[in-house]
């Protein structure tokens, strides 16, 4: 399997249908989105950490892929701790800032929830091939083929942006127009890249239309997308993690349905 960045993936997780990965991450995330308590998030995070070593990622790659999550989660928790609803003992109160027992508890719950929702999504989708995902969405989920193929073509073009940016930078430097300020240079290159992207998109749309991608009626697929035992096992794991997390929060008395009556 070759991914968007050109790297090859092997292993059991890489061969699982991307639709199953999408379903598993959704099953884990949905219950955690509807509650804000630290027990359910902590239980889900612990279970996920036990399964992450079986994802087939090297630890170096795991940290490189997930560092934005580890950075965003504490920042979100700090914001909640400073500006969350005051409840219980108040430790700091100044203008709009208020740190209390309630805001600290919400901050911890938010930190754990962000990690529990984001980490499995990142780990699972590291091994996703865009073409396999498009095949699964069109053949299994039955999304419109025109929408799926258009999105796939656009996603494949993302890898060209870096090369285009580098080529524009070298061309402008060779012509002596790269000596201005950084903001002006960035604005000029961004506009040039936008024009280039629009032209390439128009040519790509014309080429796809000429090859019958927009033709009405059922279409055939080069590869059959299969949803088998491995996919159902992964979906079952996601559902099991969500069920255990919810049950633990309910038994601990911390379940806090955020859409319920206040």
Image (tube, grey):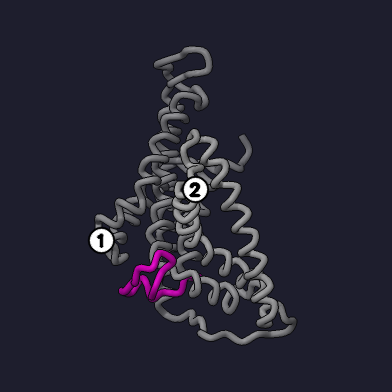
Q: Position of residue 223 (x, y in %)?
A: 51, 84
Position of residue 5 relative to residue 207, above or below, is: above
* Principal secondary structure, stretch drawn in magenta: loop
Q: Front-most of 105 and 119? A: 119
Residue indicated by mark 2: 175
Q: Position of residue 163 (x, y in %)?
A: 45, 59
Q: Quadrant of the N terminus?
A: bottom left
Q: Front-most of 41 and 74? A: 74
Q: Position of residue 82 (x, y in %)?
A: 45, 24
Residue span colored magenta: 1-19
> Quarter-wise, where is residue 127 in the image?
bottom left
Q: Is residue 16 magenta?
A: yes
Q: Front-most of 64 and 80? A: 64
Residue indicated by mark 1: 58
Q: Is 68 left or right of 177, judged from the image as shown?
A: left
Position of residue 4 relative to residue 259, above or below, is: below
Q: Residue at x 46, y 64 (%)?
A: 24
């Amino acid at each position: 399997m070759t991914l968007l960045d050109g790297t090859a993936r092997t292993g059991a997780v890489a061969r699982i249908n991307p639709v199953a990965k999408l379903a598993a991450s959704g099953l884990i995330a949905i219950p955690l989105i509807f509650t804000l308590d630290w027990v359910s998030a902590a239980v889900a995070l612990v279970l996920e950490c036990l399964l992450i070593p079986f994802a087939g990622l090297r630890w170096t790659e795991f940290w490189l892929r997930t560092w934005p999550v580890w950075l965003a989660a504490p920042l979100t928790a700090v914001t909640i701790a400073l500006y969350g609803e005051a409840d219980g003992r108040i430790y700091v109160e100044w203008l709009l800032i208020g740190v209390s027992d309630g805001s600290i508890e919400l901050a911890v719950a938010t930190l754990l929830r962000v990690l529990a929702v984001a980490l499995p999504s990142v780990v699972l989708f590291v091994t996703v091939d865009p073409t396999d995902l498009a095949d699964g969405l069109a053949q299994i989920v039955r999304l419109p083929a025109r929408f799926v193929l258009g999105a796939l073509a656009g996603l494949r073009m993302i890898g060209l942006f870096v090369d285009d940016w580098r080529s524009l930078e070298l061309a402008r430097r060779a012509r002596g127009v790269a000596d201005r300020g950084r903001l002006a240079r960035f604005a000029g290159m961004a506009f040039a890249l936008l024009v280039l992207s629009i032209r390439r998109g128009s040519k790509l749309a014309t080429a796809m239309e000429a090859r019958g991608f927009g033709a009405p009626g059922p279409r055939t697929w080069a590869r059959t997308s299969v949803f088998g035992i491995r996919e159902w096992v992964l979906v079952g794991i996601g559902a099991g993690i969500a069920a255990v997390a919810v049950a633990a929060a309910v038994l601990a008395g911390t379940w806090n349905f955020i859409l319920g009556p206040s």
